[in-house]
Amino acid sequence: MPAPLDTEFVRAVAGAADGQAVPLAAAAERRPAGVTHRALARRVRTLVAAYRSPDSALHGSERALAAATVHLRALRAAQTATGLFAGGDNVQSPPDSAFTVNDVCDAHVLAVDAGPRLREVADVLAEIAGAASGGLRTGGVHTPNHRWELCAALARLHRSFPDPRLTDRIDAWLAEGVDIDAEGLYSERSALYAAHVTNPSLLLLADVLGRTDLRDAVERHLTAALDLIRPDGTVETVHSRRQDQHGPFPLAPYLPHYRLLAIRTGRGDLGRAARTAAAGGIDDPGLLAETLLTPDLRRTLPPAAPEPPSRTRYFSTARLASRVSATAHGVLYGGSDVPEHRHVRSGLARNPTFLRLFAGHAVLDAVRLSRGFFDLGPFRAAGMRRLGDHRYRLTETLTAAYYQPLPPPRRRPDGAYRMTDEGRFSAAMAFPDRPRDEVSQTTRIDAELREDGADLRIAVDGPPVPWALELTFRPGGVPLGALPLGDGRWCLTAAPMTYRAGDDEIRVEARVEAGGPLAGPDREDLLRYDPGQDHTVTGGTDATTGDRVLLGGHGPHTLTLTLRARRATPAHHTQATSGTKG
């Protein structure tokens, strides 16, 4: 027997759709100006879903159909002669057009199933989809997740307009293998693209093609992501290779995937995550169409499995460790791609944050180490080794060079040497042909994640250079014991400090084992974060914002940092057993 309908969830989803659709229907004759093709298609999908849904205020509304028709005209006008859509920075983009065609095809299914009253809408949707089919079938991509978005569009086209050439093309893309590692992380390690692209695409392909292996891949990812959910209801992104790596990402976009697989598998842990994803309310207008197209989503969730009171996880492929207890949630990261590639670049994991710590309202969002070594930027671990239970070692060695004269056979009378990049800069000096005098610096961080915080032992070896450790706390608290520098910055010296937010706090104490004394507030030249030349050469930065506590000195140095969390009321891991929220 299938589970009964979750009427609370169904009503909430319809209400979210109405929040967008009702104003559009009220201004049905207004032509949408400056709206992208993706937004136009999404609006059409939502309007048609609202028309179809008995729980929507627009059920059977002619105004909803009128608004959908106006948006469809604008969408058709955005379609070029190739069938792909104009707009955005990706010119004539098959994957960007695939996002739009996915919504067009979903709206087409909803319109066709509604009978003759939506026939005109269905015909225009079919025309748009048909015009795009050839471009999507032969088009290419430029990111990993684009393959699955494009395949999902081809599968939806085949669902409504069967064509073996479409499934042949899908098979060609899927033959490359889904880019998911043994620990359940996609190659881009991005919560944003997992939630909005890869998960929904693979689930659609699994249903249309009967490929249970694709559904299993999503379940593996969702299982891994359970250990990436943070106490503030966001998903960890420090290890991401995409644009979400520098900011929080909410769990809410994961809701339909956790919900669907919890219902289909009966897994209580996935159901718990679905409840957490919905805990802040449902505001995604697109969910209504998903529940109509995939009725299983409307069923009641299985009872939630209780969350373990303490747990640890180490993702060896991403070099990401976490330890969770009732007092603290610690995250340690050593998986940057920058040391290997020697550049900060789109598509690389490049966030220099190596530690986070959550203690209720007191949140240490980022710990970063900056060094003044040839302007090569902050510490990004090139290696992370597990030393034992909860103990890890992060290491990085930086090397720069001074170059000797060219050997006689390599010299040119005209002085016209080839332009080459030596890792720090480029010049017409044929660097690979020259003898090198190298200068190196090694940074090693031994870290232990504890139930009540973390212990760090930081060693900066090599030539004498300035360094600064920056601790960025989430605003809302008060740093006690640190010396103010102004502009949201404080200086930590030998005396301990406490960051207190409400009744929760994180206490920090630094002790020098080797090297000179820590810099005082009069040495602001040392107490600063330096993003490195890859950012500064273009006038950019990846600096954090918040309440920043800094300590620093002129190395070499070895110091220990003790971080202890205290909560007035430790977290209790309780979950509701049914309904939308937990």
Image: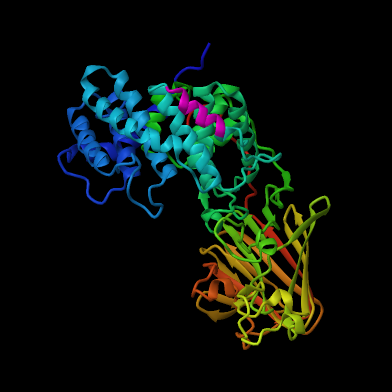
Q: Where is residue 268 in the image (x, y as percent from the top left)?
A: 61, 28
Q: Which region shows up in magenta?
A: 163-172
Left or right of 490, for residue 402:
right
Q: Is residue 378 left or right of residue 9?
A: right
Q: Is residue 256 left or right of residue 128?
A: right
Query: Considering depth in this image, is 181 or 280 the residue closer to the camera?
Result: 181
Q: Which residue is drawn at 57% across and 27% down?
A: 262
On screen, 111 above or below 184?
above
Magenta run includes residue 347:
no
Image coords of residue 257 (percent x, y): 52, 33
Q: How far across and how far down the image is residue 160, in percent?
A: 38, 23
Determine the main secondary structure of the stretch shown in magenta.
Answer: helix
Identify the image's colour scheme: rainbow, by chain, secondary structure or one colour: rainbow
Q: Total of numbered circles in the picture?
A: 0
Q: Is residue 168 magenta?
A: yes
Residue 250, image x, y percentages: 50, 47
Q: Which residue is drawn at 50% across and 74% down?
A: 538
